[in-house]
Image (spheres, helix red, strand yellow):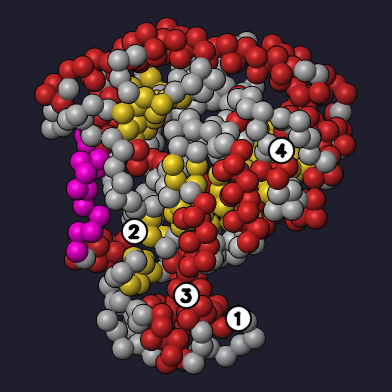
Amino acid sequence: MTNWHPTLPEGQGPLYVRLADRIAEDIATGTLPAGVKLPPQRDLAYDLGVTVGTVGRAYAVARQRGLVSGEVGRGTYVLGSRAETALVEDAKPDLTRDTTGTGAGPMGTRAVSWVQGAMEAPSDTAFAGTRISVPAPEAIRFDSTSAPEIGQAEAIRELTTAITRDTPHEIASYTRDVPDSWRIAGQKWLSRSGWQPDAGSIVPTTGAQAAIMAIVAATTAPGDQVAFETLTYSSIARGAALTGRRPVQIERDDQGPLPDDLARVCAQRHPKLLFVMPSMHNPTTGLMGEDRRAEIVAVARQHNLWIIEDEVYGSLRETGLTPLAALAPERTFHVGSLSKSATAGVRGGWVSSPTPHAQRLYTAHKMLTGGISFLLAELSARLVLTGTAESFRGKILEEIAARQSLVQKHLGAFERETAPDCPFFWLKVPDPWLSGTFKAAAAASNVLVDDEDEFKPGRSDKVYHRVRIGITNPLTRGETEDGIIALKNLLEDGTACYDSFE
C-alpha cells in the first residue's frame, strides 16, 4: 500500500472531483505507478479532513475514467497502460478463477468481474458480457429474443410510405418536439390491467434500453448505487457501471426481490434506484404477485427509492395484476417497447414517468442518444394507433406458443421454467453439465445460448446450473426445432461426448 498523502488542487469545483483530478495527475507523473494500492477510503478521509463519502466518490470518478480498479475486501489499485495493467492483473491473487466450471471454454470467453461499478478487464473487453461478439453466420441464435417474423414487413412498408408522403419536411429535419399522437400511442401501448398512464407522463424513446439508461442518468449521479436482483437483465447493470453507477445485488425468489433483503440493502447501502421486471422476469419467466408488489412499493417509499418497472417482456403477458406504476406513480418509471411483442427493428419505446420528471427524462434521453428519429417514432405511433401493433402481438403470441410446443415435444423430460407466452425458457442442465461448459458445447454445435453468468449483475456464490434459451430469434419454426434437437442431443449424451480441447 502506498503512503500517498495528496494535497487537493486549488479550485471552485467539488472536493471529490478535485481529488479525482489529483489522482489522475499523480498517475500521469509516476507518483502513483501501476499496481500501487490507494489508501483505504477511511484513512485518506482522515488525513485530508474530508468525509469518507467524498473520498468514495473521488475513487468512483477515477474508476469511471479508467484510472483505477477496485475490489471489495482488497482495495483500489492504480491501472497503467494496457501492458502494465496485464502485468498487474497477473501479479494479483487469482480471485476471478472460476471454481464452478462456468468459465472459459473453446470459444475463449473470459471471466469478467463487476466490482464497485468497474470491470477488471482491459478496455476492449470490459462491458462485453459473456456472449460471442461475432457468431458464425450459420449459428442458430438462441442467445437473443426479439419479436419473431410474422409478416410485419408489408404493414411497415405501407405505413412508412404514408409517413414520407404526409410529412416530407419532418423527414428532412431534426425532431424538435413531441406530437400529441406519440404520447397517446405510448399511453395506449403501456395501459394494462385497468391502469392507464396519464398522457402527460409519456416520454417516447428509442427502444427500452435507451429509455432505461436515460432514467438511470436522470435519477442518479456517478458513484450512486443501483439495486438489481441477483438474476436480472444484466446489460442494464453493465450500462449503469459504465456510467459510474455501482450495481448492488438484492436476494430474490420466484416472485422477484425479497422485501426484507431490499430493506436491508437500502438501510446499509442507500441505493437510489431499483430495477425490476415484475410481469415476466428475465431469465426465470417469473411473475411478481400482488402482495409482493405492495411490499416492494412500501420499502421503496420508506427509503425514497426510485423504481424502474421493465415491462418489455410483460407486454406479452396478461396478468390482471396492478402495475407498480399504479401503486406508486410518484416514484415509478414504467418502461415498454415494441421489440418483443410487435417488431424489434423499429426501435419504438415509451416510458410512463412520474409526471414532474417527464421533461427531465426527455432531456436525458436526448442528451444520451442525440434525440429520437422522427421516422421511427412516427412509425411506432402509427403502428399502435392503427391497431397494427396489437394485431402483431396476437400473431406473435401464437407463434411463441407453437415454438414452446416444440420445446415440450423434445425437451419435456428436462427441468425448466417456461410458459406458453414466454419467448425463452430457463433450462436446468443435468449433472454433470455446468452452465458454462454446456454453453461452450452448444456453441461448438453452432447453437448459441446464454449461460447463467450472463444474468448476474455482479459476482455471486450462487450456482444455478441453468441456461436461458431464447426461441423467437430464429427465422422459422424449422430452424428453431433444429436447434432444440441439437440441444437435446447434448443433454442426453452428456459431457463424455464433449471435449473442450481443439
Q: How busy is the neighbourhood of tag 1: few (under 14 within 10 Å), some, or many (20 plus)?
A: few
Mark 3 / mark 1, whichever is N-terminal? 1
Q: Is residue 440 left or right of residue 58?
A: left
Mark 4 / mark 2, whichever is N-terminal? 2
Q: Quadrant of residue 407?
A: top left
The range drawn in magenta is 93-106
Q: CA distance from mark 4 to mark 1?
A: 35 Å
Give the labeled residue for mark 3. 56
Give the labeled residue for mark 2. 120
Label 3's element? helix
The verdict on residue 171 being magenta is no
Q: Are marks 3 and 2 in contact (CB under 8 Å)?
A: no
Residue sitting at 21 percent across and 44 percent down? 100
Label 1's element? loop
Give the labeled residue for mark 1. 14
Residue sitting at 32 percent across and 23 percent down? 415
* Residue nearest the viewer, comparing 1 with 502: 1
Q: How busy is the neighbourhood of tag 3: few (under 14 within 10 Å), some, or many (20 plus)?
A: some
Residue 426 position within the rendered picture, expressed as x and y whole percent measured from the top left? 39, 28
Q: Which mark is residue 367?
A: none
Give the labeled residue for mark 4. 350
Q: Are marks 3 and 1 in contact (CB under 8 Å)?
A: no
Q: Is residue 375 left or right of residue 111?
A: right
Total numbered badges shown on the rendered structure: 4
Mark 4 / mark 1, whichever is N-terminal? 1
